[in-house]
Amino acid sequence: MAKTKVIERKPLTLAEKTFIPQIVGGLKTTFSTMLKKPVTLQYPDERPNIPDNYRGVPTLVKDPNGREKCVSCQLCEFVCPPKAIRITPGEIDAEEETAHVEKAPKEFDINMLRCIYCGLCEEVCPEEAIFLQDVFSSSGYTREEMINHKEKLYELGGTLPDRHYKWDKKKAAEEKGNPHH
Amino acid sequence: MEIVTATLPVVLPIAYALGMISVFMTLCGYSVLAERKVSSWIQGRVGPNRTRMALLGYIPVIGNFLTRLGLFQPAADGLKFLFKEEITPGHVRVGYYYLAPIVALAPALTTMAVLPFGRYVDADGIAQPLVLANIDLGMLFILAISSLGVYGIVLAGWASNSKYPFLGSIRASAQMISYELAMGLSLLPVFMWAAAPGSEYGMSLFGAVQAQQGGWLIILQPLSALIFLVALFAETNRLPFDMAESETDLVGGFHTEYGCFKFGIFFVAEYAHIIMGSAVFVLLFLGGWNFLPWFADPWSDGLMGTLLSIAWFMAKVFFMIFFFIWIRWTLPRFRYDQVMSLGWKILLPLAVGNLVLNTLIIALYDTLTR
């Protein structure tokens, strides 16, 4: 059996009974807090530091050459648990420099009233085109405003660095006569 | 010209009184701001820092500084109270309901008539107080009038016709009656020393200040000062004694049913009591406008000296107001029975003991020096 040790409680001294030393101690504590820098973050003026792996509002990104990376494969649309994403695929014009990519979204809508910020779209995307970035507040006056259309998504997403340049390599290989690179 | 000289004795006191009221009300507004700012600093926050006034707020550097200090906030607060919708709940006793805030504020403003706030030296070279009415019974007047403040609270609680305000007002009145005794008794030794037989001042506050040219009474009479300070906190219904409000168990206490400007008046009355209490404590125990303990009056006799004495007095009052706020954000609230036992079982016997002790000392002193 475990031994319990009874700690003896000392009776209060006269000074302690008046509470005055304790009150003075408390006053010291509050005064020293008063001189410290406040911890407040002035929110709309200052923004908190957001870690890189934060799951904010989903956005579409372009690669550093300005090519839109989404090829409208619709994997994100299929994987999206609350069915927040709606994609209308479109063809890329044959005149374009990136015509070999063949497809790009004509419409890309994410309904932010449905989105649950799970990040599955980012995980599933084979083109690394959709990212949940650092934007965490979205607001609007109507339901329609809460649907992020393609322009808005690209505006929010901006450009992210690309490690592969997959389609540029593909084109280069094709020009060298190795279409199955 | 004759009309001017004839009406001057009537017009001048009214003008002085109006001037003092306006200064006093401004102080009330700014002590609300001080409360908000100091509380936020103590809690590691920033406090009100957004309100900006049209012209003053846009002066390049100063405007931003004043805005960050929140100096325009009291105006915004007051206007908010003024322009909100006046709501009178259906179940209140209407006449008394409207009367209560006035009854709460009036005593606090009345007491300032006998409050000396500086000194000047008249043509004969005698120091005179700057005060609206320099009556011999100054302290007694303040004690008598300021305890009328409880009627406002009782009336508010009863007129609200609702149980939480009623409980709050009953608690407040019981508390004020209990602490009034200790307060009065703690002051007796002060005036036994300050207004010794043959003194020309009686119980006037000016006399108490003049008597402290030697040493401040907080050093000579620490026990009286302590009892008076604790009783003062209880009388002004400030934390740790805010039984009247205690929002955790009584919603808002006696002003639960009050809104907009009527609530604003209660609010101002609370701060008016704090300022009055601070001023009285400064006058009685912190030497009034005397410079330092045992170093009374380094100021010249002219206008500059008068202004400096007022400024020094105000600085002490501001410190006391800060102290009130500081205590509020340091100590938790007492339980109701603890308030009562502190008042009746500790402070009252202590005050009586202090009185007896001082009487004995004075008797001994008199027999020895005769």
Image: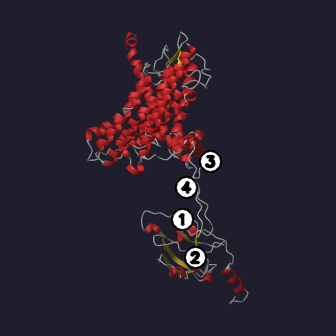
The mark found on residue A36 in the picture is 3
Residue B22 falls in image quadrant: top left
Chain letter of disc 1 in the image: A
Q: Which of marks 1 and 4 is nearer the N terminus?
A: 4
Q: Earlier in the sequence, mark 1 or mark 2?
A: 2
For label 3, the crowd category at 10 Å Cα-Cα, with few meaning under 14, some 14 to 19 and many 20 or more, is: few
* Residue at disc 2, secondary structure: helix
Chain letter of disc 4 in the image: A
**Spatial distance from mark 3 to mark 1, Cα to Cα?**
30 Å
Labels 4 and 2 touching (C-beta < 8 A): no
Chain letter of disc 3 in the image: A
What's the residue at 26%, 47% (across, down)? B91
Residue A48 x %, y %: 59, 59
Q: Mark 2 points at which residue?
A: A122
Q: Name the residue under label 4.
A: A43
From the viewer's perspective, tell me whether residue A41 is left or right of residue B338. right
Q: Earlier in the sequence, mark 4 or mark 2?
A: 4
Type of the residue with mark 3: Lys
Q: Earlier in the sequence, mark 3 or mark 2?
A: 3
Type of the residue with mark 2: Glu
Residue B138 x %, y %: 43, 22
